[in-house]
Image (cartoon, helix red, strand yellow):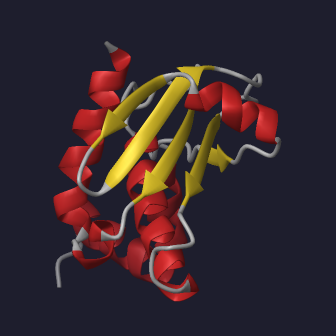
Amino acid sequence: MGSGPECLQKAVESLFPEEGQKEEKKFLPKMVKLESLKKSEHFRKVLKGKKINTDFFLIFAKKSVIQPKVDHLNISFVMKKKIGNSVKRNKIKRKLKAIVQKFSKKKGAINKDYTYIVFGKSNAYAQKQNVLMPLMEKSFNRLKK
């Protein structure tokens, strides 16, 4: 073992692993909270807005119906009752939420001045997230235009 500064640094990191982790956490982007719509009048207003349709989901967007809080994104995930059972519907919603959560970390990927409704389709159940992710990104980019 050497007695140089590198050796001392390794010893400190092995004894106090939290110290190195604290520095890394400073640079992580803030997590955006996904806020769901509550009132049917808000849903009606958003459903009159822009619409993007894919094989796996349908996105409606409208300039903010309700004023979002700081670091909040107004987005609701909806499934029709005709699609499978509750387990299947919830899995699709969780999958779509996870994709949106990943995009919200990217700066400018999702416009927080808009309110969104995402309708999941039954095809999304069988697809992997890495297939749905580029489609979701492309859809949100089309909504920006």
Which one is nearer the viewer's eye here, 58 or 63? 58
Image quadrant of residue 2? bottom left
- Residue 76: x and y in percent read 61, 48
Q: Residue furthest front?
A: 82
| Residue in view at x 52 percent, y 86 percent | 85
Taking the image as shown, residue 38 lies to the left or right of residue 95, namely right
Residue 28 vertical position relative to residue 42 in the rendered view, above or below:
below
Can residue 24 be spotted in the picture? no
| Residue in view at x 73 percent, y 28 percent | 68
- Residue 60: x and y in percent read 48, 34
Can residue 131 be spotted in the picture? yes
- Residue 111: x and y in percent read 47, 24
Residue 131 vertical position relative to residue 62 in the rendered view, above or below:
below
Which one is nearer the viewer's eye here, 106 or 2? 106
Q: Which quarter of the rendered picture does the N terminus lie within? A: bottom left
Q: Which quarter of the rendered picture does the C terminus lie within? A: top left
- Residue 51: x and y in percent read 40, 30
| Residue in view at x 22 percent, y 72 percent | 128
Which one is nearer the viewer's eye here, 23 or 125? 125
